[in-house]
Image: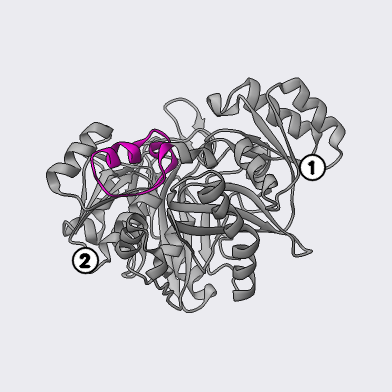
Amino acid sequence: MKVLVYGSGGRDHCLADKYGDSQQVDKVYFAPGNPGVLYTPKGKRGLIERVPIRDFGKIVDFCLEKGVDIVDVGSENPLEEGLIDLLNEKGIRTVGPLKEYVRLESDRAFTDDLLVEIGVPKPEYQVFEDPDQARKYVRNIGYQVVVKANGLAAGKGAIVCDDVAQAEKAIHDIMEKKIFGDSGNKVVIEERKYGTEISFFAYLDGEHVMPLKMFAQDYKPAFDPDDTESIKQFGGNLNTGGTGCYCPHKLVSPWLVNRIIKEIVNPTVNAIYNKLGWQYKGVLYFGLNLDPYDRLDVFEINVRHGDPEWEVLARKLSTDLFEIATSVWEGKLDQITQIWNNQYYVDVIAMEGRSKASRGWNKGYPGRYGKGHRIKGLDQVERGIAIFFAGVDEDPEKGLVTQGGRVLHVVAGNPTLEGAREKAYRNIAKISFEDHYNNGANCMRYRKTIGL
Ligand code: GLY
């Protein structure tokens, strides 16, 4: 069987890798992919092949020409741009929602209103199109808030505020300065919740739902809580798309899994199938909070796997992903048995840190970051460690170089969480990014508290 994974980030690389584990799959095309895959065992032996095509029409032609059996679209942007619709029109089987259904992620206000209507718990919120009205609201509300861009913002669109001044700044940045472009024409201002964040996932096949009975915890803040120097420099501990992840989440238990399914997943899926009448086929991501009083709340719903959550869940999942994908397409998810191995997994993300620019300095991700830094030490990484590449490029002289803020994921497994942490950190320490403007100093940065 031949699979094509469309995407270029760490989650997409991990999807390609997981399909490559299937006994039924002998070729995984990764489009437009990233050159990092050629530095991995599956890339070296040609099981995963990078196809540097971005154009949707050409992707359709490629799939037809090669006889691709199924296409998995891993991220929200190509889904919103209608890649699934186009592939289906040509009779190509897919995993991922149609363009219309991406609204669940790309229009927060729509989804929040739907959740309230069907009685799914979520923090209190108000929607604003006028920044002055939004400012008036946060001055009067009295409790802390999160200001969220209504549209897509690469997982970074929520600004968690300590006080009114920060909330007003967030409103200004999103609605007037437009740091997330038109996604900030509207904001959702939501009550800030305290507790433990949970990322929960389910596959849907248009008729059934298969909630994953395992969940993960993402570490969104850019810096470790005790890294006060960086937090001060960046004007707060900024939210990122994720800096690392571990699973099983410390709260995984049959009791909580059942509660999440009963209180959140089932009513939402029922509304999708029966109220909206959508034949949704793909992944649903529930961003949740469990507060100290055991109340569950939905922060957000996304239409794809989490990044970096998928990188750890995929390692723990022993069920064949190709079988899941085929069942999503054929409406047979009820026939899938979930198998999870007995390991803990920790994913630590190597990010672009402070580096020298041609003039001055780059602060590093999530601020302005440098590019083109040679990635060294990959050959030192121990066997059994998975490296998933994200923001990388290939340079004719330097080989693999950095290209994005989040550069690569180091994922390690062990029967204990401490063992997995130790292994991930031991191996990420072997990797470095060479800052060519600063005498080759290492400009790689990573958080030290993933899994703690
Ligand atoms: N890890 C957060 C996200 O994928 O949106």
The residue most toward the left is 65
Query: How packed is label 2: few (under 14 Cα within 10 Å), some, or many (20 or more)?
Result: some
Does the segment drawn in magenta span residue 81?
yes
Examine the image and state in which quarter residue 114 appears: top right
Is 394 on the left or on the right of 269, as rendered? left
Is 364 on the left or on the right of 37, as rendered? right
Residue 197 at least partly seen: yes
Image coordinates of residue 103 in percent, x first then y, are: 51, 37
Regarding mark 1 in the picture, which secondary structure is present there? Answer: loop
Label 1 to label 2: alpha-carbon separation: 51 Å
Q: Who is closer to the viewer here, 35 or 307?
A: 307
Q: Is mark 2 within 8 Å of ligand 1?
A: no
Give the labeled residue for mark 2.
24
Magenta residues, as a range?
74-99
Image coordinates of residue 210 in percent, x first then y, are: 47, 63
Q: Who is closer to the viewer here, 331 or 103?
A: 331
Does the segment drawn in magenta span residue 16?
no
Q: Who is closer to the viewer here, 369 or 244?
A: 244
Q: How is the image coloured?
A: one colour
Disc 1 versus disc 2: nearer the observer: 2
User: How many numbered dots are placed on residues in this image?
Assistant: 2
Q: Which amino acid does label 2 sit on?
A: Gln
Q: Which amino acid does label 1 sit on?
A: Gln
Identity of the residue drawn at 62% across and 58% down: 264
Whichever of labels 1 and 2 marks the residue nearer the N terminus, that label is 2
Residue 396 at least partly seen: no
Give the labeled residue for mark 1.
144
